[in-house]
Image: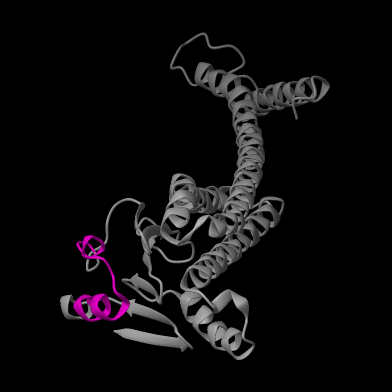
Amino acid sequence: MIQRFTQKKLTWLDVLNPTTEDIREIAAEAGIPSEFTNDLTVTIPHNEVFHVKGALKITLDFPIVKRTDINHPHEIKFIVTKTHLVTIRFEDIESIHRFGKEFEVLCMLNNKQVTQPINLFITLLNYLYDAMYLKLDYLETKMRDIEEEIFNEHEREMVFEISSVSRRLITFKQTISAHENALMRLRGSVGFAFGKKYEERINELEHHFRNLNRQVYALSSTLDDLRDTNMALLSTKQNETMKIFTILAFITFPLTLFTSMFGMNTVTTPIVGQEGDFWIILSVMAIVSVFFFVFFKYKKWI
């Protein structure tokens, strides 16, 4: 499916799940060099940048946060020529739809950001970076919910939630880390393809990338603190439980031994056979239990 956005001599072609016929059509319309068309109908496992005089192509992956298939990031191929911007993607991306609506507004305002394909490309890429902040905001909200649940004594349930957020944050970090080298190569490619004056605008993209990286590492640090706090509280609860069971075992063991001794089938067992022997044995057991309880209290073990 090909969607067209036009502003004077500038055209943006947004292509979803392109077929070979679609690629042939947009290549002819946008003047895409033949060396750019070899992988436009399939996804590739890495980011890459190519350029020739008057055209460049960059493939970037963008992380998924809310969906379950987070290990399958959004891939977008950007192709910029002197008259066209082409974006090729293989699934719906909400931020692209939102930018399409804003493109119409920018055109109505005659914004200089949409006067040249290369300016439109950099504006779109900045917009996609801004959209990634929203994904980090979602993770930050999840972490605040986790923090609240931790201190509401739901430590055990939060072990899985922390692992889930950690996995999404790690995948996010891995996905955008590849952008660093791509942006470094993009600066030279933009200068070669369209002129040195456009290289300065790559600073905007690099600034976005650095800020994203800082926020990702800040969230990672916060998540590590939450994990440590949760594990400390969980360990404390488990230790308290184990201490109680240990104390109970320490109290009941001598009593069990005591009753076993008097349960032996012997002739000369003391106390057994005397008047009130049951109450005597029961009283001794009660005294031993009270002694151990007082001793544990004195030692502040309970």
Which residue is painted at 64% across and 41% down in the image? 221
Q: 132 or 64: which is nearer to us? A: 132
Farthest residue in the top direction?
268
- State left or right for residue 259 relative to residue 12: right
Which residue is painted at 65% across and 62% down in the image? 141
Which residue is painted at 25% across and 75% down in the image? 27
The answer to whether any part of residue 229 appears in the image is yes
Q: 129 or 21: which is nearer to us? A: 21
Find residue 122 and report its horizontal and vertical position in percent: 52, 65
Give the color scheme: rainbow, by chain, secondary structure or one colour: one colour
Find the magenta span and give its range: 23-39
Decide whether the magenta segment is chiefly helix, strand or loop: helix
Find residue 210 and report its horizontal and vertical position in percent: 61, 48
Find residue 120 and report its horizontal and vertical position in percent: 51, 73
Q: Quadrant of the N terminus?
A: bottom left
Q: 40 or 274: which is nearer to us? A: 40
Count of numbered labels shown in the rendering: 0
Farthest residue in the bottom direction?
108
Q: Quadrant of the C terminus?
A: top right
Which residue is painted at 56% across and 48% down in the image? 156
Farthest residue in the right direction?
298
188 above or below 267?
below
Find residue 48 and report its horizontal and vertical position in percent: 35, 52
Please tell me whether residue 127 belongs to the stretch shown in magenta. Answer: no
Please tell me whether residue 31 belongs to the stretch shown in magenta. Answer: yes
- State left or right for residue 163 relative to residue 25: right
The answer to whether any part of residue 273 appears in the image is no
| The quarter of the displayed image where residue 247 is located | top right
